[in-house]
């Protein structure tokens, strides 16, 4: 059978790497652009009820598939960070985390934008561990920072630097996740552009680039640390061949992943393939490796100086210290994470550290938007104004609001269904909307 919408060379290669029947079924599934579903993952730190039509995703706690795709942008809980819209197969990194005998205290998500996997890593890792989410492209890094701030977890650094620059942090990380750039074959059903831009030459270039990325960052992974290698392609040259190259040339061993047979995941030598004709989600490849090569470890220097925090704004007392995140921004970071954070900030371009608490203007401290969305914001620090759905959408589109009832003047926390959305400055007759202009909803549905 021919599939005109799919690249002919792609279909021909599939027939060489799997059975004729599997290749035909996979091409048919990729050709069915109406057949793909929608999935989301609920934030365990901001729990909400799953949608009525949601079905649990077996390999990821708090992950669900939906029968239909709602207008997520029109749901204030989406902007509050109560859930993240994430492709179902990519949630399988939870399987890699479960397979780690020693859970990482310091994990680098190297190619993290827009933030789906980083928010999942953050939910998997226990309190007091540090996630470093990195994206080299500045514009994409700003989107990553937005999504991590909405997720609200305090133990985070967001960076925007290239893999080779992490090499100076020798042996610092217990785990590195590399969702490497690939030819995107797994996205053919979801994204027509992925089909039009594909070529065998592009696939070969991606395979080589992936090796370079892993080799560049490899010194930053400690001996015995874990590498999570993933792509959204079916190409063996970008997947299994690269995993074998890492093992042979850099020094690693594959840690087998063993999903339940009922999930429909194809497992070869402990490496996982998500094929859209067999399981939910789009195409995805996942492998877990452990570093066997000997690596020196960076010596952590004296931590940077700290700044007093407005303690009454915070839920916890004494766990967090204040540092200067930007020239006019005060941030809170867990004290035990400061030495590692200092080493990273001294070597890597960092655009967010912990939780931004306040913008400093002279002697005045203006509460930062990230504080409103953070799980460390005190419930009693600011008066709260519960908004209706219409008011919440007006707030999120940065329209003017007039608060009802006896709301005190000053900074007010706007909430929807009990979940914070951000700050207002209540002047009495009106309230200034402090929602970040670059985050606003630009098109409201009526």
Image (tube, grey):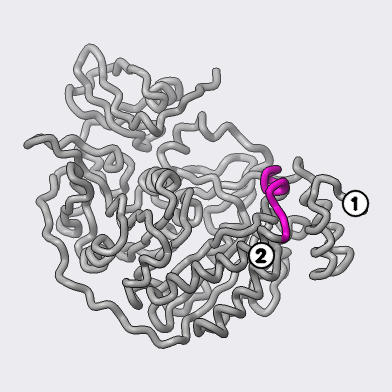
The local secondary structure at tag 2 comes to: helix
The local secondary structure at tag 1 comes to: loop
Q: Which residue is mark 2?
A: 204
Residue 52 visible, this orientation:
yes
Q: What is the x, y in percent for residue 93? A: 54, 64
Query: In the picture shown, does residue 251 fall above or below 122?
Result: below
Query: In the picture shown, does residue 253 fall above or below 267?
Result: below
Taking the spot 40% from the left edge, 75% from the top edge, the residue there is 221
The answer to which quarter of the image holds residue 337 is: bottom left
Residue closer to the observer: 241 or 362: 241
Going by the image, does 374 lie left or right of 138? left
Q: Which residue is mark 1?
A: 2
Query: In the picture shown, does residue 394 fall above or below 201?
Result: above
The answer to which quarter of the image holds residue 224 is: bottom left
Q: Is 190 part of what is drawn in magenta?
A: yes
The boundaries of the magenta stretch are 189-200
């Amino acid at each position: 059978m021919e599939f005109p919408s799919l690249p002919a060379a792609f279909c021909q290669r599939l027939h060489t790497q799997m059975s004729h029947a599997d290749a035909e079924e996979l091409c048919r599934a990729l050709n069915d652009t109406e057949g793909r579903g929608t999935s989301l993952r609920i934030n365990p730190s901001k729990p909400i009820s799953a949608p009525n039509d949601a079905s649990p995703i077996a390999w990821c706690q708090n992950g669900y598939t939906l029968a239909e795709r709602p207008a997520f942008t029109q749901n204030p809980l989406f902007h509050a960070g109560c859930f993240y819209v994430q492709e179902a197969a990519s949630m399988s990194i939870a399987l890699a985390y479960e397979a780690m005998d020693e859970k990482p205290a310091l994990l680098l998500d190297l190619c993290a934008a827009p933030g789906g996997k980083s928010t999942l890593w953050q939910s998997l890792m226990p309190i007091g561990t540090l996630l470093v989410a990195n994206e080299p492209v500045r514009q994409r890094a700003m989107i990553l920072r937005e999504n991590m701030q909405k997720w609200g977890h305090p133990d985070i650094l967001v960076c925007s630097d290239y893999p080779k620059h992490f090499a100076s942090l020798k042996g610092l990380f217990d785990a590195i996740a590399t969702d490497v750039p690939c030819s995107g074959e797994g996205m053919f059903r979801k994204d027509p552009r992925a089909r039009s831009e594909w070529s065998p030459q592009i696939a070969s270039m991606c395979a080589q680039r992936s090796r370079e990325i892993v080799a560049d960052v490899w010194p930053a992974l400690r001996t015995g640390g874990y590498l999570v290698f993933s792509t959204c392609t079916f190409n063996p040259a970008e997947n299994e061949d690269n995993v074998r190259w890492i093992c042979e040339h850099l020094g690693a061993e594959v840690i087998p992943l063993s999903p339940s047979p009922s999930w429909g995941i194809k497992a070869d030598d402990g490496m996982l393939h998500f094929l859209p004709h067999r399981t939910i989600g789009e195409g995805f490849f996942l492998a877990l490796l452990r570093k066997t090569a000997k690596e020196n470890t960076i010596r952590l220097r004296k931590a940077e100086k700290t700044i007093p925090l407005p303690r009454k704004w915070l839920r916890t007392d004494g766990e967090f210290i204040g540092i200067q995140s930007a020239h006019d921004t005060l941030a809170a970071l867990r004290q035990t994470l400061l030495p590692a954070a200092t080493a990273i900030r001294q070597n890597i371009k960092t655009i967010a550290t912990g939780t931004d608490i306040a913008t400093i203007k002279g002697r005045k401290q203006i509460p930062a938007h990230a504080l409103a969305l953070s799980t460390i914001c005190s419930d009693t620090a600011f008066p709260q104004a519960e908004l209706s759905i219409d008011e919440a959408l007006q707030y999120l589109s940065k329209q003017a609001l007039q608060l009802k009832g006896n709301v005190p003047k000053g900074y007010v926390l706007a909430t929807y269904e009990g979940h914070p959305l951000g700050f207002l400055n209540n002047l009495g007759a009106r309230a200034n909307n402090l929602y970040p202009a670059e985050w606003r909803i630009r098109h409201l549905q009526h």
